[in-house]
Image (cartoon, rainbow, N blue to C red):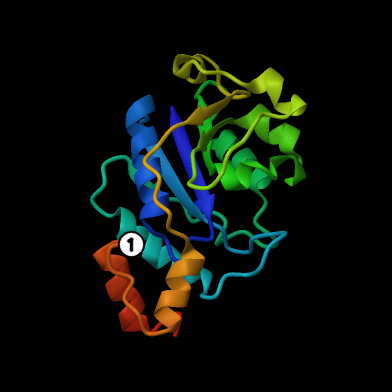
């Protein structure tokens, strides 16, 4: 089973990395692909370029077995819609490999506002990771998709929603950017390699 985790990663931090690692181990994933969003729709645009965010993501996952960088959204014109990315991945891996998408509980709460959300569930499972400060009682629309059996995600290629309890880090990219803008250190919030890159490139100043 393959997983993807997307986001602006502006910058990537331990709140992205640790949950992905725990889910990878819990499901014995063969691969977890990190996909930086080049031009995220329906939200503010990232503060630094897609190239910088790709570089930071690669630095963050270097040496972690099973983690990989997927830059397809960087090379695609137009807004980076999740459904388009999943269609592209599904075309590559075929219709026999289970595919899951890791999303935070905060992002999941607006899932039905995503473009073609029903199609997304035909292409992949959703693994929803817990987030500090967020609770959720599944709406009526989600009921047919819910499962508490991890093995079901391996037996079927798509179409299930699983809520995963993970170590919760109360870290946000917004918080990190504010720290850096005010001249404070971001140590212990993100990998050292990413912190060094930010300092070298003088990002978020």
Task: Give me the residue at 70% from left, 45% from top.
Answer: 110
Task: Give me the residue at 60% from left, 23% from top.
Answer: 160
Q: Is residue 193 left or right of residue 109?
A: left
Quadrant in which the C terminus is drawn: bottom left
The crowd level at tag 1 (other Cα within 10 Å; few <14, some 14-19, many 20+) is many
Image location (x, y in percent) of residue 198: 36, 76
Whether residue 197 appears in this view of the structure is yes
* Residue 121 vertical position relative to residue 115 in the rendered view, above or below: above
Image location (x, y in percent) of residue 44: 66, 68
Q: Nearer the viewer, residue 30 or 169?
A: 169
Q: Is residue 199 left or right of residue 99?
A: left
* Residue 87 vertical position relative to residue 180 in the rendered view, above or below: above
Q: Circle 1 is placed at which residue position?
A: 190
* Quadrant housing residue 196: bottom left
Image location (x, y in percent) of residue 86: 61, 40
Q: Is residue 46 left or right of residue 22?
A: right
Q: Nearer the viewer, residue 5 or 92?
A: 5
Q: Disc 1 on helix, strand or loop?
A: loop
Task: Give me the residue at 62% from left, 35% from top.
Answer: 136
* Residue 39 vertical position relative to residue 118 in the rendered view, above or below: below
Image location (x, y in percent) of residue 189: 33, 62
């Amino acid at each position: 089973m393959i997983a993807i985790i997307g986001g602006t990663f502006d910058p990537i931090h331990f709140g992205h990395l640790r949950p992905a690692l725990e889910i990878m181990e819990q499901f014995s994933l063969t691969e977890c692909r990190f996909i930086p969003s080049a031009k995220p729709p329906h939200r503010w645009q990232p503060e630094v370029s897609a190239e910088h965010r790709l570089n930071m993501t690669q630095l963050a996952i270097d040496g972690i077995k099973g983690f990989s960088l997927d830059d397809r959204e960087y090379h695609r014109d137009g807004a980076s819609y999740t459904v388009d990315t999943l269609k592209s991945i599904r075309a590559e891996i075929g219709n026999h490999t289970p595919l899951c998408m890791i999303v935070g509980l905060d992002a999941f709460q607006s899932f039905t506002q995503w473009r073609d959300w029903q199609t997304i569930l035909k292409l992949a499972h959703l693994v929803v990771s817990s987030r500090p400060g967020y609770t959720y009682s599944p709406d009526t629309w989600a009921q047919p998709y819910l499962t508490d059996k991890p093995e079901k995600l391996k037996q079927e290629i798509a179409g299930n929603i699983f809520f995963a309890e993970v170590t919760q880090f109360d870290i946000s990219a917004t918080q990190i950017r504010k720290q850096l803008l005010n001249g404070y250190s971001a140590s212990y919030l993100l990998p050292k390699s990413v912190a060094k890159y930010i300092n070298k490139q003088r990002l978020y100043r």
